[in-house]
Amino acid sequence: MTTPAILQCVVIDDEMLAIEVLENYIHRVPTLELVAKFNNGIDALAYLNTHPVDLLFLDIQMPDINGMNVMKLLNKKVNVVFTTAYPDYALEGYDYNALDFLIKPISFDKFLRSVGRAQALLPKSEKQESDSEYFYIKAKGKTLRLLLSDILYIEGLKDYVIFCTADARHISLHSMKELEEKLPSSQFIRVHKSYIVEADKIEEIKGNKLKMVGKEIPIGRQYKAGFTKFVESKKL
């Protein structure tokens, strides 16, 4: 099983509140790392032209150098997600092969959509492809290939389950018991009658709840002992 690559991110915005929102979102996603943030294009360009960056969240409307001009002056290709309060800029932005546009105020689900697009562009070696574990599910009349490493958690919904990834929710006809038996126990843990979680995505545990990608998930009484044993095995 391959470990998902960490995307190194930079945020550029002249509004501190906008930076704080994106910073919070980035910290909630385990596969993202905020390596720098800037409130102006001049300082950002000096950094971007000398440091590797995987994903750039770039405000368009800024004083001195706006987001479009930042892209013009960059001496290398960077995957960019434009952030703006003005939807009219979107058409012009596509001239710069923008990965996505996020209209302020930015919601977390739209943010995750952009992240998913960036992750889909990551190059994969032949070894990574052959080592990746996956299975097929039926959802919305289609058969989908789903990587285990893409799953954040699985939520039970009567006779169905929802496979939740960073950028999608796939509803499929399965039982939680079936999935609990089929999924690798070293990677997936059932913590509640309605939830199976991907262990590597757990960010925080407090009382009878755990947090992953900003979502709180309850820990059921009958599953707590097994979950606690797992957590103890991972402590330093």
Image (spheres, grey):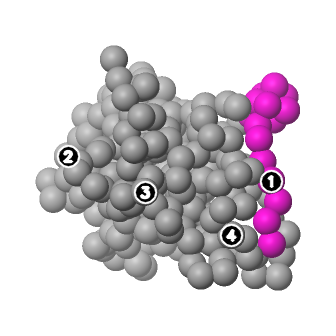
Relative placement, left or right, of 128 versus 79 is right
Task: Mark 2 vs mark 4: give the one in front.
Answer: 4
Q: Are marks 2 and 4 in contact (CB under 8 Å)?
A: no
The quarter of the rendered structure image containing the C terminus is: top left
Between the residue at mark 4 and the residue at mark 3, the CA separation in whole angstroms equals: 18 Å
Q: Which mark is residue 39?
A: 2
Task: Give the residue type at disc 3.
Answer: Gln
Task: Give the residue type at disc 4.
Answer: Ser
Between the residue at mark 2 and the residue at mark 4, the CA separation in whole angstroms equals: 49 Å
Which residue is located at x 66 percent, y 62 percent?
Answer: 177
Between the residue at mark 1 and the residue at mark 3, the CA separation in whole angstroms equals: 28 Å
Residue 201 among those drawn in magenta: no
The answer to which of 194 and 76 lies nearer the viewer is 194
Q: Which mark is residue 175?
A: 4
Label 4: which secondary element: loop
Task: Mark 1 vs mark 2: give the one in front.
Answer: 1
Q: Earlier in the sequence, mark 2 or mark 4?
A: 2
Which residue is located at x 77 percent, y 41 percent?
Answer: 133
Local crowd at mark 4 within 10 Å, few (<14), some, or many (≥20)?
Answer: some
Task: Give the residue type at disc 1.
Answer: Phe
Label 3: which secondary element: helix
- Per the image, the residue denoted by label 3 is 222
Q: Which mark is residue 135?
A: 1
Q: Are marks 1 and 4 in contact (CB under 8 Å)?
A: no
The answer to which of 85 and 22 lies nearer the viewer is 22
Q: Earlier in the sequence, mark 1 or mark 3?
A: 1
